[in-house]
Image (cartoon, rainbow, N blue to C red):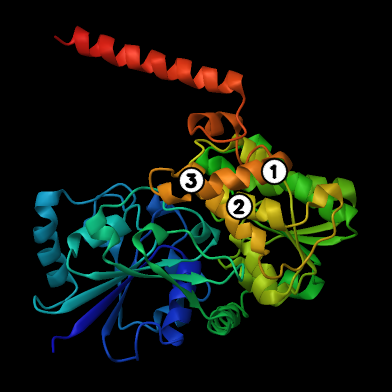
Amino acid sequence: MHRTTQIFQVSTLYGAATLAAALDAGLFGPGGAARRILLVSHNAAVPETALRLDEMHGYGPLAARFDEVVSWNEAISPYHPSAWGPRGSDTVLWQRALRLLWDIGEDERVDLAVESIQANPARALVAIFSEASVDVYADGLMSYGPTREKLPLTLGRRVRRLLHLDLLPGLRPLLLSEYGVEPVVVPDGAFRAVLDEVARDAADDPLLAPVREERPTAVLLGQYLAAINILSADEEEDLHVRMLAGAVRAGHRSLVFKPHPTAPAGYAATLHKAAADAGVRLTVQDAPLLAETLYEHARPELVVGCFSTAMVTASAYYGVPVARVGTALVLDRLRPYQNSNRIPLALVDHLVPDLERDETPAVLGAAPASLGALVRAMGFCMQPRTYPALRVEAEEWLRGHLAGSPAGYFPALRLAELGLPGSSAATRARVRAARARRKVGRVVRRGGGR
């Protein structure tokens, strides 16, 4: 029997922690049965200037579970991991080159575990190792939403499992379901044990001293939505200030802000001024660590965010009450409708109390039975060609529940484009007129090319 090499592709420490928990739970077979390579991809816009995975607390213990760590950036240099993929005619050459570079014999079997299979670098890897079986792991709320792009059937059939955290017990992921891919839960106990291990690795960081000494009661989470052109920088600063104001109204006098790793320093300056004006203490925690590590050391009583997965992990794994701010604004700004952030936003908007409406922060329980139907209806509206079988269910849901749903879940224009219940005659007429104009334009362009 030929030797097997398992390649685990990661770009975030959270993803590496998910894989470590899956390994510890035996989801990739017993240790020693295969050679395990951790393939690190640094996907920042300018990788040379951004925080690297190996600079974060907890990286060492996680990497120790693998036989070897290699860099995808170095392997494909000077190309960028998010932008590069091999041409079809080059995949055989690239496989030979990577087998030589990573000391994988020509007759050795390769198994892949990748994140976000719709995009590079995962898409490039599965193309290069075209005979490899594929596991996809999802480390956040996006696993509950639809597959972002239609995959070639030959690729979809290669995916064996979707490994995911059970962040909302009872809710079944929609991702890759169109290919019959079975979702497999990474056990809560294994993941929490890994998070504890990561937290212990950060215990001696002096930047955590103020948090341990002051014990802030509320954590504010930044996401840097300006980086993906959802909000402007000023709007995002205001969003963070709204989080702080909501926490203060709820009675919290000592707070800590966990910015996104790529957020500008100016965000912290604005928040410091807001905290001073409110007469409360604010600590900005920009140490290279996971938000979950901060929860372990600070033991907060509240976590506030917009729609970060770290809000849900605070509730699911640490029992911390959570509250949201700004989901309606972001839902309204999200373009196009198919944007894969829509499902995470809707889940948080639907389940998490609104701090600005003075709703009481809460620890989330199991997903209500009605949530799956909402997700499937939104999934159909986002990707109708991928999930045509969901149309009838979506129509039934819209007839019964649209009136009570926020506008950002099912905009009238999208309903009209798909001919679904809930759109007005005027909106449908606009859609028909726009389609007619596009058809005339195509005819004119074809005629002009003769």
Question: Is residue 334 found left or right of 238 in the rendered image?
Answer: left
Q: Amino acid at mark 1?
A: Ser
Q: Is disc 1 in contact with disc 2, using a CB cutoff of under 8 Å? A: yes
Task: Specify few, some or many for label 3: CA neighbours under 10 Å numbering under 14, 14-19, or 20 or more.
Answer: some
Between 135 and 377, which is closer to the camera in this rendering? Answer: 377
Question: Which of the two labelled residues, at mark 3 and mark 1, occupies the earlier sequence position?
Answer: 3
- C-alpha span from label 3 to label 1: 18 Å
Image: 402 above or below 174:
above
Task: Specify few, some or many for label 2: CA neighbours under 10 Å numbering under 14, 14-19, or 20 or more.
Answer: many
Question: Which of the two labelled residues, at mark 2 and mark 3, occupies the earlier sequence position?
Answer: 2
Question: Which of the two labelled residues, at mark 1 and mark 2, occupies the earlier sequence position?
Answer: 2
Image: 278 above or below 69:
above
Q: Is residue 206 visible?
A: no
Q: Which mark is residue 405?
A: 1
Q: Position of residue 415 (x, y in %)?
A: 55, 34
Name the residue at 55% across, 60% down. 141
Q: Which dot, 3 or 1, sits closer to the camera?
A: 3
Which of the image's four quarters has the N terminus? Answer: bottom left
Which image quarter: residue 62? bottom left
Q: Which residue is mark 2?
A: 374
Q: Amino acid at mark 3?
A: Arg
Between 394 and 86, which is closer to the camera in this rendering? Answer: 394
Q: Position of residue 164 (x, y in %)?
A: 48, 70
Q: Which residue is mark 3?
A: 391
- C-alpha span from label 2 to label 3: 12 Å
Task: Specify few, some or many for label 1: CA neighbours under 10 Å numbering under 14, 14-19, or 20 or more.
Answer: few
Q: Is disc 3 in contact with disc 1, using a CB cutoff of under 8 Å? A: no
Question: Is residue 418 found left or right of 243 in the rendered image?
Answer: left
Image: 274 above or below 413:
below
Q: Which dot, 2 or 3, sits closer to the camera?
A: 3
